[in-house]
Image: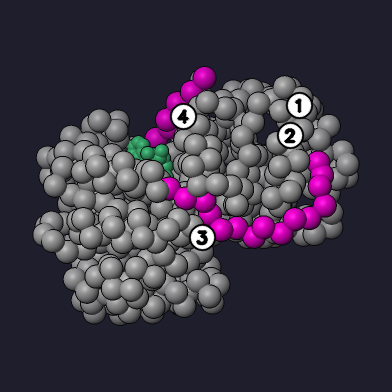
Amino acid sequence: MSAEVAKVAEEEFVDYEEDQAVVADAAGDAKKGSYAGVVSTGFREMLLKAPLMNALQDCSFEHPSEVQQECLPQALYGSDLICQAKAGTGKTAVFVLATLQLIEPDDKVDTLVMCHTRELAYQICREYLRFAKYMPEIRVHVYFGGIPVQKHKDMLKSATPHIVIGTPGRVLQLVTEKDLDLSSVKRVIFDECDSLLKEVDMRSVVQQVFQQTPHNKQVMLFSATIPKEIRAVARLFTAPNPIELYVDDESKLTLHGLLQFYVELSDEQKNRKLNELLDSLEFNQVIIFVSSVSRCQALNKFLNEFGFPSIAMYGGLAQEERLKRYNDFKEYKARFLVSTDIFGRGVDFERVNIVINYDMSKDADTYLHRVGRSGRFGTKGLSVTLISSDEDKEVLKQVQERFSVDVKPMPEKIEISTYMSA
Ligand code: ADP
């Protein structure tokens, strides 16, 4: 991607349309771990080209993770792929590296990546930029809704991208209005594919975009959670008999380095408990998940008043503000982030070692994705979930049953070394 296009893409980062429903108010660096050692194939044996090997070195990717070991050779071979692997284990690099290895850039779109949120699209774009550092001829564009479509149209007029990353709505609009031509696409990737395919409305938009791509192409779908019914839907997008890699079965999807506890209390006791937790625990960065925009704003205010400078992240923020907050947290300018489920999956903040579910998630899958924001790439982490209703208890029960994980009551004292990498 040219520097100019990269700049435009960054400038055009936009906010995310989220359920804006307002409900009653309430309210040091982690060392990278590693999955290497389990298997022996290195990036070198995968015969990646020199610009990619150099970029891998710059990114300090020494050994492929398990999912990369399993999936990258298949992706490089051009196979259709459905891949489920734990959060934070390096699925993004599978399709980014495969695309950049296989691409033969001409004046057509080669690769289309779709995902469900704008932040994730932005993050994926950045991953492409990191790995295409030594491939200056590759143009990467990212498109999502919320900003004047004319800007994207102008970008497309000035240069045809080789790699397009986008959220389904905006991509469909650009295709329908004949600004974006997907008729020569060679690869289509769905990241967090269950989110793209679960809801009928989103799925229908995804399908309409997909129909604009040629019959012969490589299709790859990724997520940490691909429930059985979604697997069947996913297969409708691939060639018959795609390679299906479930790096772990569902019961093993929780992260090894992650300690998980819960605390039972009333809603009114939550702020006090949170205060106690933040006072007593050691952390690099913390994400606190809440159930609504209004609770997010209220809790953020509370934390700031109590000396825990935090950033609030929710849908409906102005575009520039949204990007600023994402980048500020990524760059460690704040240690606390209060977020709705908007950042419940996909996003990668490598220094986060504690996730607090101030409000329990609505379902077990969302819980798994949220807690997977810590303990990423083999690092240690801790999650604490505040349980205040029978519904919360029910979700916790489902989590324990489905993922065979023992979420225990929070003990009085937790040894720091069990959740902080040295
Ligand atoms: P996932 O998509 O599986 O949730 P990501 O692709 O976001 O995970 O990767 C999680 C983190 O691990 C990112 O910070 C990424 O840069 C890092 N990472 C991925 N693969 C490797 C590797 N082989 N070596 C070192 N770090 C890696």
Q: Do labels 3 and 4 touch, CB within 8 Å?
A: no
- Does any atom of ligand 1 lie closer than 8 Å to the CB of label 2? no
Viewer can see residue 195: yes
The reply, left or right, for residue 389 in relation to residue 104 is right
- Could you say which disc has been placed on residue 225 in the image? 3
Cα distance between the residues tagged 3 and 2 = 33 Å
Cα distance between the residues tagged 1 and 4 = 23 Å
**Local secondary structure at mark 4:** loop
Task: For marks 3 and 4, give the one nearer the viewer.
Answer: 4
Residue toward you, 186 or 53: 186
Q: Which residues are magenta?
A: 13-36
Q: Which residue is mark 1?
A: 305
Nearer the N terminus, badge 3 or badge 2? 3
For label 2, count other residues whose C-alpha is less than 10 Å away and answer few (under 14), some (14-19) or many (20+): some
Q: Residue at x 28, y 73 (%)?
A: 178
**Local secondary structure at mark 2:** helix
Nearer the N terminus, badge 1 or badge 3? 3
Quadrant of residue 215 within the rendered picture: bottom left
Cα distance between the residues tagged 2 and 1 = 6 Å
Q: Do labels 4 and 2 touch, CB within 8 Å?
A: no
Which amino acid type is shown beneath numbered disc 4?
Glu
Nearer the N terminus, badge 3 or badge 4? 3
Q: Which residue is mark 2?
A: 301
Look at the image and say whether residue 14 sits in the magenta stretch.
yes
The reply, left or right, for residue 310 in relation to residue 102 is right
Quadrant of residue 413 within the rendered picture: top right
> How far across and how far down the image is residue 48, in percent?
16, 46
Cα distance between the residues tagged 4 and 2 = 22 Å
The reply, left or right, for residue 177 in relation to residue 349 is left
Q: Do labels 2 and 1 touch, CB within 8 Å?
A: yes
Q: Residue at x 37, y 66 (%)?
A: 171
> How far across and how far down the image is residue 103, in percent?
16, 56
